Every structure is written in structure tokens, then in C-alpha cells.
Amino acid sequence: MKKQFRDLESLRAERIRLEALCKQKEEELTNSLEYVQDHFGSLIIGSLLPFTREQKDMVGGIIDKVQHYIGKLMPGEDSKWHASLAPVMKIVQMVVAGLVYKYVKRAFR
């Protein structure tokens, strides 16, 4: 759907409106990505692993605690090591998720 602009002023107003909309959408996306980063472990557990509700709650709590401690170990975002350690920490989270999965499966047999 094309909008026809009759003068330069209406075109500028539309540009300003669209820039504001883009900024809003960018902030929403950033917030969503931050949520995924902060709750990565429990999202993986909740979506991929075949747990009952009770097992998911137990595992989610364990994963959240582990993720909290991993976050404390990570250097600050301004550190030169932060970017290179981030993928390693995601691997550590997945290993922990696998170990917790085995533990919970054994505990609920």
C-alpha cells in the first residue's frame, strides 16, 4: 500500500513517525533477546526436554541458579574476554542442562 505525499512536510512527518516506530521495535527486540539470554537454561528445559511439570520446575530452578553463578563468573561486557567467553558459557549451560536432565530422570524413576 503506497502512501502519496503531497508536500515535503508530510513526507518528513512520515519519516519521523517511521523512525520512532523502528526505535520502538528495536527496543522491544532488544528486551526480548535480553530475556532469552537471562532465561536460556529454563527456556531450553521447558521447550525441548520431555519433563513433567514438577520435573520442569525442579530443573528450571537448578538451571537458573547455575546460570546465575555463571553470570557472576563472566567478565563485564566491556572486558575484551566477554565476547570470546560467551559461546563457551552457552556450551557450559548445555552441558549442565544435560547433566541435570540425567539426574532428574534418575530421581523420578
Image (spheres, rainbow, N blue to C red):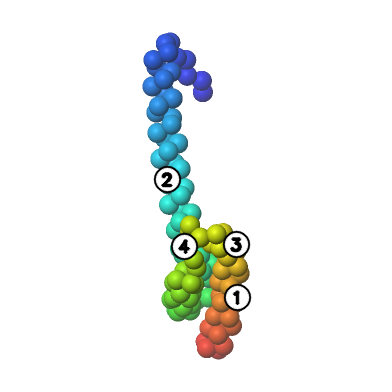
Three-letter code for the amino acid on which mark 4 is drawn: Gly
Rate crowding at label 1 as few (under 14), some (14 to 19) or many (20 or more) other CA atoms within 10 Å.
Answer: few
Q: Position of residue 67 (x, y in %)?
A: 48, 71
Q: Using the numbered discs, state the Cα–Cα distance from disc 3 to disc 4 in whole angstroms.
A: 12 Å
Which of marks 1 and 4 precedes in the sequence? 4
Disc number placed over residue 76 in the picture, else none: 4
Which of marks 2 and 1 precedes in the sequence? 2
Q: Position of residue 104 (x, y in %)?
A: 53, 83
Q: Using the numbered discs, state the Cα–Cα distance from disc 2 to disc 4 in whole angstroms.
A: 22 Å
Q: Is residue 94 left or right of residue 36?
A: right
Three-letter code for the amino acid on which mark 1 is drawn: Val
Between marks 3 and 1 in the image, the one whose residue lies nearer the viewer = 3
Between marks 2 and 4 in the image, the one whose residue lies nearer the viewer = 4
According to the picture, the residue beneath numbered tag 3 turns out to be 84
Q: Using the numbered discs, state the Cα–Cα distance from disc 4 to disc 1 in whole angstroms.
A: 23 Å
According to the picture, the residue beneath numbered tag 1 turns out to be 95
According to the picture, the residue beneath numbered tag 2 turns out to be 27
- Specify the quadrant of the image occupied by residue 7: top left
